[in-house]
Image: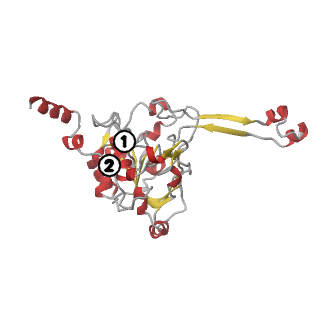
Amino acid sequence: MEKKIMHLILSLLCGISAFSQNRTEVAGKSPWGPEDEIGALNMMTDESRLAALSAIGSGQVYDLSVDYFVGMPSFDALGDPPYQYWLTHTPHGTVVDNPNGMGEKMNRKVSYTGDAISMYTHMGTHIDALNHFGLDGKIWNGYTPEEHLGDKGWRKTGAETIPPVIARGIMIDMLAYKGVSQLPKNYRINAADLQGALKKQNTTLRKGDVVLIRTGQAMHYQDAGAYLDQYPGINLEAARWLVEDRQIMLLGADNLSFEAFPPEREDNWVPVHTYLLAEKGVMFIEQMNLENLATDAVYEFVFIGASLKLKGASGSPMRPLAIPLK
């Protein structure tokens, strides 16, 4: 008994609640049916998209994506490849090599540049598909790798199934709420933080919204060392409040991992990832650029985003946009 009590005290001191530590974690079954592959994005309809587009009140467009470049910050600690870029054709090289067989005169007249990239699918501004993380051998809706994962990717919930997203968007600015230029290192954003920021911004959440959280990490994006030096993000309590209480459809943030690191739980190294993706079927976008929205104090907007249809992939690059409401 003493050992059990000591363990509980230590857990509390580490910020790990008994409820969170002992709660049952299982891959969720979709309320949208046994064939569902997009989870909470089923909340989006033709009517909801039209309602969002009808609320546009400006021609100004905010690009919420980051640049891709050699040396860009990436979560490559687990061995995933960094971003690579190389030229496949150059104007002078085509003169020398004559790859099209049309001769020097033609290749001097028509300059030709070509290039290629290699990258991890979870780099830059990207969306996590529902197959990215699972629990006990199952991903969202009970799909298993034994039945649904082939040599060329997942046959269920691959990135190609993610529809274009058009919805009301809300940006929650944690730096403005806290009145700081940077959050404390590896700060865990909780539900009270989100509620306080929304109140200060005079914004409210609605069912089916897209919610984007500004941690300020995008300010360091051009310096991979500074960007990777800390991992602020939301905690499990905040995720549960957004999904279960506010019924948010899609989440996003400007940080690398969405949730804070090191993990808040002893028994799960990515509890927010597994809760959102595997348990609740809620996708999220990472490594966004929310700085221009923050500068102009734009908290409500129409969110428009579409990802590459990478068949079977666990994530995909995305270029989301925000257009202010009326």
**Residue at numbered disc 1:** 259
Q: Amino acid at mark 2?
A: Ala
Instruction: Report the side of 115 relative to 174 (left or right).
Output: right
Q: Amino acid at mark 1?
A: Glu
Question: Which label sits on residue 282?
Answer: none
Q: Are marks 1 and 2 in contact (CB under 8 Å)?
A: yes
**Residue at numbered disc 2:** 239
How far from the left and from the top, in percent, is residue 267? 28, 36
Instruction: Report the side of 32 relative to 313 (left or right).
Output: left
Instruction: Report the side of 44 relative to 234 (left or right).
Output: right
**Dot 2, crowdedness within 10 Å: few (<14), some or many (≥20)?**
many
Disc 1 to disc 2, how far (Cα)? 9 Å
Q: Looking at the image, which residue is at 33% across and 47% down?
A: 275
How far from the left and from the top, in percent, is residue 226? 45, 31
Nearest the eye: 140 or 19: 140
Identify the image's colour scheme: rainbow, by chain, secondary structure or one colour: secondary structure
Q: Secondary structure at mark 1?
A: loop
Q: Secondary structure at mark 2?
A: helix
Instruction: Report the side of 76 relative to 276 (left or right).
Output: right
How far from the left and from the top, in percent, is residue 277? 39, 48
Is residue 59 visible from the viewing direction of this image?
A: yes
How far from the left and from the top, in percent, is residue 11? 20, 34
**Dot 1, crowdedness within 10 Å: few (<14), some or many (≥20)?**
many
Is residue 198 visible from the viewing direction of this image?
A: no
Quadrant of the snapshot with the N terminus: top left
